[in-house]
Image (tube, grey):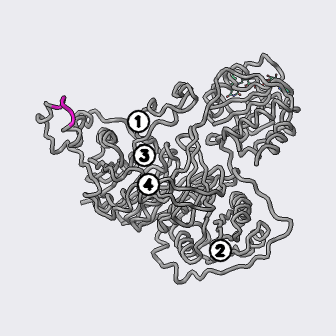
Amino acid sequence: MTKTFKIVVLAKQVPDTRNVGKNAMKEDGTVNRAALPAIFNPEDMNALEQALRIKDKFPGTKVELLTMGPLRAADIIREGYFRGADGGVLLTDRKFAGADTLATSYALSMAIRKMNPDIIISGRQAIDGDTAQVGPQVAEKLGIPQVTYAESISASESGKITILRRLERGIEEVSTSYPVLITVNATAPACRPRNAKQLMRYKHASTLSEQNDNEHNSYLPLFNMEELTIPEWGVADVGGEEIKYGLSGSPTKVKKIENIVFQAKESKRLSASEEDIDSLFIELISSHTIG
Amino acid sequence: MNNIIVYIETENGKIADVSLELMTKGRELANKLNCNLEALLIGDKVSHLSEELFLYGATKVHLAEDSRLEFYRTLPYSAIAISLFKSEKPQIALFGATSIGRDLAPRVSSALTSGLTADCTSLEIGDHNDAKSGKEYKDLLYQIRPAFGGNIIATIINPEHRPQMATVREGVMKKMALQQAANGEISKIDIKPILNDSDFVVEIIKRDIQERKIDIKGASIIVAGGFGVGSKENFKQLFELAHLLGAEIGASRAAVDAGFADHARQVGQTGVTVRPKLYIAVGISGQIQHTAGMDQSAMIISINNDPNAPINNIADYAIVGDLNEVLPRMIKSYKKNIK
Ligand SMILES: Cc1cc2nc3c(=O)[nH]c(=O)nc-3n(C[C@H](O)[C@H](O)[C@H](O)COP(=O)(O)OP(=O)(O)OC[C@H]3O[C@@H](n4cnc5c(N)ncnc54)[C@H](O)[C@@H]3O)c2cc1C
């Protein structure tokens, strides 16, 4: 028997902040967040592909997604299924609300303990926060090594895993033992497309909340819902200290939020005079465009 | 005393610019808080770099030296920082938002359960009144950063947890040495009780780190020059403005073909596509092959002496005039108006 691995991919559902084009703006110049579609965080897709490549090489390997978010984040687990994953867990609980990266990492680490993988792979960062903190923080909470900015991963039977890292000004190749947490860069290969067979098989995969909530699901008992039920875990399922979750587990607080107000789009003509340039720069500084 | 500690990153035996920028900012914050500025320096044969840190105002350099610490590795470096922060209890700890800083700082903050704010664009000292508990907090670190894809600016605080930790990208803060070095001392960290073999489980097999390579794609501000800039020599004015703004330099193909700028900086159909927060087009006419690579920028400012240049049609602000007058005025205005 060849070696098999248990892999958990951390993935987040995010608003598509990259497409805050000129039309996702409200009249007052602020972003209309509701107008942004919820998507699978791009670098988490790269992470999923790395996990699936390990599975290609070591058949029998199990790839599961773990996502924390509201009920609709079950989309992430379904998307994982469509692309070849074996399942996933939705971590959802009101008690997680208001979590900063530290409290998020705590919740994820508690769920990971329960899933007990050899390898944890996540995207380098999520586009709604760009912090790149959750991966390293989860690794610390689990007391395992982290390898960030991976571009390719080669697992081996010998108990060693080799990772090529993309750094600001070059590459580094490292090897380590299991368990390990790896974060993947956008420069890694894109994720494979959805697989038609997987799509047919898992399109009705849903959480119990979704099954109970949806009146139109009356035909669902026709399917083998046991295979198709996405587990939902809350604080009660993963355990841990309640104070470390959500708002109370978050050392950082948001004191103030300023919406960036974009100026009207017709172009303004300015002269080269000192006064014109001065007033432009004062405006740019006060809108935090520069500074 | 609860001081400020800046993590010092080194590359090829030199201190990274971002660390010196943080020392400069840290000095300003330390003056306001009436505390000391200290540095954490980890590596192999790096003690001589302390002199430069004294010149940036460090009153103490915490030094961890060992041949196994020649290259950055997460586990041993974080173990040293965690142990130092536990014993020194700094009120603020600053890291560069580099590949290394963004790997190290979260690991440290997790172990200390202190908060961490990534990629701050501004750091200030201020008070806070908690509306819910009615508690007053004096002299907190305001960690100011763009969020949500740059569409909002958030001010983050850590009222209850220390150290207050933040990362800052290179080029965001200014770098300025003192006229006269601070009267500083080196404090050696005894690493024996801190590190054990399992901290070296990640082995570096190969490293290939190049000298700085140009990559303007991720820049949030781009100052781009065209054929109208006139010469390579004259591009220096763009570099000066870009340095102040923390911007990258872009160029049109005509400017690249003329040898004014490196090809890696070319924006457009046959160059890179960029979508910065601010794009300043200097002496660029705005042909479609160029604008295809930059018209999604959140804000565009053009500087052109031709009122009918096509670039003006997509610019939010079109400055009609000679770039040789406008650029020095911009530099002057920035210096005058920035705090
Ligand atoms: C297949 C193809 C692909 C191409 N791909 C690209 C591409 O990727 N990127 C790209 O940039 N171009 C590309 N081009 C070239 C493009 O068509 C233009 O020729 C080029 O962008 C022009 O560069 P420019 O605006 O710097 O120069 P010019 O068109 O010469 O414009 C110079 C501008 O500077 C202004 N000016 C002059 N002096 C001053 C002064 N003292 N103060 C203020 N303003 C001044 C002038 O009014 C003028 O508007 C491509 C062309 C082709 C055919």
The residue at the point 36 percent across, 49 percent down is A68
Label 1 resides on the chain identified as: A
Q: Would you name the residue on which mark 1 appears?
A: A38
Label 4 resides on the chain identified as: A
- Of B97 and A249, the residue lying toward us: A249
The residue at the point 74 percent across, 79 percent down is B185
Image quarter where the N terminus of chain B lies is: bottom right
SS label for mark 3? helix
SS label for mark 1? strand
The residue at the point 61 percent across, 78 percent down is B66
Q: Are marks 1 and 2 in contact (CB under 8 Å)?
A: no
Q: Give the spatial CA distance, label 1 vs label 2.
A: 47 Å
Q: Would you name the residue on which mark 4 appears?
A: A153
Q: Give the spatial CA distance, label 4 vs label 2.
A: 29 Å
Mark 2 CB near ligand 1 (8 Å cut)? no
Residue B152 in the image: above or below residue B81? above
Q: Would you name the residue on which mark 3 appears?
A: A44
Say which label, 4 or 1, has the lower sequence index: 1
**Residue at the limit of the structure toward the left, as seen here:** A222
- Of A236 and A7, the residue lying toward us: A236
Q: Are marks 3 and 4 in contact (CB under 8 Å)?
A: no
